[in-house]
Image: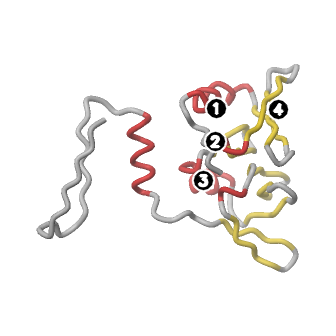
Amino acid sequence: MKINIDIDDKHEVTQITIHTKEWTEELEEIVKVIKKRRTPRLFASESDQTILLDPKEIDFIYAEQRRVYASLANRQLELKMKLYEAEEILAPYDYMRFSKSVIGNLNHIERFELSFNGNLCVYFRSGNKAYITRKYVAPIKEKLMNGGQSNDN
């Protein structure tokens, strides 16, 4: 990859042009990084308090009994949004769908364990665990093999 940067007072606005033969996952990641200005915060509630969550703190988000929760290392907090809304916000931060009701942080995964029914049990560094249904196993493995997990936490 070749990078050219032209710094000059004649430029009114910052403009980025990418010349390429074909669209790749690497380009998609670059565009996500460029578009990401600030880390979005999620609002969770606990008792009568509203808590701001950084996406890097969350192991996974799950829906249960028509409510959405964020699972952190040592607690579960209710989010005031739909699961698909959280998925859209968290996609640039290496979150992927694990099942119909779970979105997981690929950067927190420690190991996998195969279940008898073809699902994978995912163990996070915090000790939490979640399940990946068969439908989502291949895309997650592919993302992880292509560098989807970063160890810069």
Secondary structure category for the residue under label 4 = strand
Q: CA distance from mark 3 to mark 2?
A: 8 Å
For marks 3 and 2 on the same chain, the one whose residue lies earlier in the sequence: 3
Q: Identify residue for label 1.
A: 140
Question: Of residues 48 and 127, which is closer to you in this image?
Answer: 127
Badge 3 local density, few (<14 within 10 Å), some, or many (20+)? many
Counting from the top left corner in percent of width and height, residue 77 is at 81, 63
For marks 2 and 4 on the same chain, the one whose residue lies earlier in the sequence: 2
Secondary structure category for the residue under label 3 = helix
For residue 141, side relative to residue 121 (left or right)? left
Q: CA distance from mark 2 to mark 1?
A: 7 Å
Q: Identify residue for label 2.
A: 96
- The residue located at (88%, 75%) in the rendering is 47
Question: Of residues 79 and 71, which is closer to you in this image?
Answer: 71
Badge 4 local density, few (<14 within 10 Å), some, or many (20+)? some
Q: CA distance from mark 1 to mark 4?
A: 13 Å
Secondary structure category for the residue under label 2 = strand
Identify which amino acid the numbered label 3 is placed on: Leu
Q: CA distance from mark 2 to mark 4?
A: 15 Å
Q: Identify residue for label 4.
A: 121
48 shown above or below 91: below
Identify which amino acid the numbered label 4 is placed on: Cys
Badge 1 local density, few (<14 within 10 Å), some, or many (20+)? some
For marks 1 and 4 on the same chain, the one whose residue lies earlier in the sequence: 4
Q: CA distance from mark 4 to mark 3?
A: 21 Å
Identify which amino acid the numbered label 2 is placed on: Met
Counting from the top left corner in percent of width and height, residue 48 is at 84, 80
Counting from the top left corner in percent of width and height, residue 24 is at 39, 32
Q: Identify residue for label 3.
A: 90
Secondary structure category for the residue under label 1 = helix
Q: Quadrant of the N terminus?
A: top left
Identify which amino acid the numbered label 1 is placed on: Ile
